[in-house]
Image: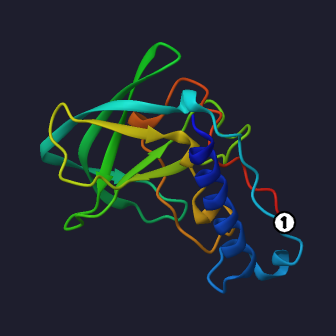
């Protein structure tokens, strides 16, 4: 991993920390912002920046995701990403809401969930430059995994990763569990 990449990840993290500390729309409750000195992250690790093979779902199946509130949210499973970590094969589904052509939403849990990372799971978003096709190879960068806003305040309702996106491995990359109190 180049130092340019590490510099970009660290700059992105500083920008996010500034937003969380200063912005009126920060998920950090106002009473905790003065003491907030940044999120906790795993060090960037090239082992968790993986190449994934894409399978596109031409007729996407709807998936009801439970949320941290009581209202499930419907997504469409639009792609599956197959990849390796430490020589073992895994897959994560990518979702979009109906009518959304933007980023692909990849919520997931792994064996750090509830230990080192937020107990409800983490998120990633992939923004491909062009429409994906079967067999395409994309980079999934777990170093960019982040906790949803509901990790910081119960006023947010967040989708929970469905069982198909529970990885049976440790992914020590991205944001760690919030600790701002």
Relative placement, left or right, of 28 versus 88 is right
Relative placement, left or right, of 168 versus 34 is left
Residue plotted at (62% across, 30% down): 111
Q: Residues within 10 Å of mark 1 (few under 14, many from 20)?
A: few
Among the 4 quarters of the image, the one containing residue 72: bottom left
Instruction: Please state which of residues 51 and 3 is positioned toward the viewer in this rendering.
Output: 3
Among the 4 quarters of the image, the one containing residue 21: bottom right
Instruction: Please state which of residues 55 and 43 is positioned toward the viewer in this rendering.
Output: 43
From the viewer's perspective, is residue 6 above or below residue 130? above
Among the 4 quarters of the image, the one containing residue 178: bottom right
Q: Is residue 121 visible?
A: no
In the rendered image, which residue does mark 1 sit on?
37
Residue plotted at (53% across, 24% down): 168
Question: For the view shown, which residue lies furthest in the right direction?
Answer: 35
Instruction: Please state which of residues 97 and 4 is positioned toward the viewer in this rendering.
Output: 4
Residue plotted at (73% across, 37% down): 115
From the viewer's perspective, is residue 137 above or below residue 96? above
Relative placement, left or right, of 133 versus 163 is left
Circle count: 1
Regarding mark 1 in the picture, which secondary structure is present there?
A: loop
Instruction: Please state which of residues 83 and 49 is positioned toward the viewer in this rendering.
Output: 49
Q: Position of residue 139 (x, y in %)?
A: 39, 38
Q: Is residue 52 visible?
A: yes
Q: Position of residue 52 (x, y in %)?
A: 34, 31
Q: Quadrant of the N terminus?
A: top right
Residue plotted at (57% across, 71% down): 156
Q: According to the image, what is the colour scheme of the structure? A: rainbow
Q: Position of residue 7 (x, y in %)?
A: 64, 51
Question: For the view shown, which residue lies furthest in the left direction?
Answer: 58
């Amino acid at each position: 991993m180049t130092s340019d990449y590490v510099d970009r990840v660290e700059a992105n993290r500083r920008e996010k920390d500034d937003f969380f500390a200063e912005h009126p729309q920060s998920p950090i409750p106002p009473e905790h912002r003065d003491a907030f000195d940044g999120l906790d992250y795993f060090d960037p690790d090239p082992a968790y920046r993986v190449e994934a093979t894409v399978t596109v779902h031409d007729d996407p199946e709807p998936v009801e995701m439970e949320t941290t509130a009581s209202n499930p949210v419907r997504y469409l499973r639009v792609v599956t990403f197959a990849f390796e970590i430490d020589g073992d094969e895994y897959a994560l589904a990518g979702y979009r809401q109906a009518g959304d052509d933007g980023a692909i939403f990849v919520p997931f849990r792994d064996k750090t969930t509830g230990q080192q990372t937020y107990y409800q799971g983490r998120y990633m978003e992939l923004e491909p430059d062009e429409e994906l096709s079967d067999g395409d190879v994309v980079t999934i960068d777990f170093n960019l995994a982040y906790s949803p806003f509901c990790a910081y305040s119960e006023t947010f309702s967040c989708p929970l990763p469905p069982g198909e996106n529970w990885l049976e491995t440790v992914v020590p990359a991205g944001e760690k569990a919030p600790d701002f109190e």
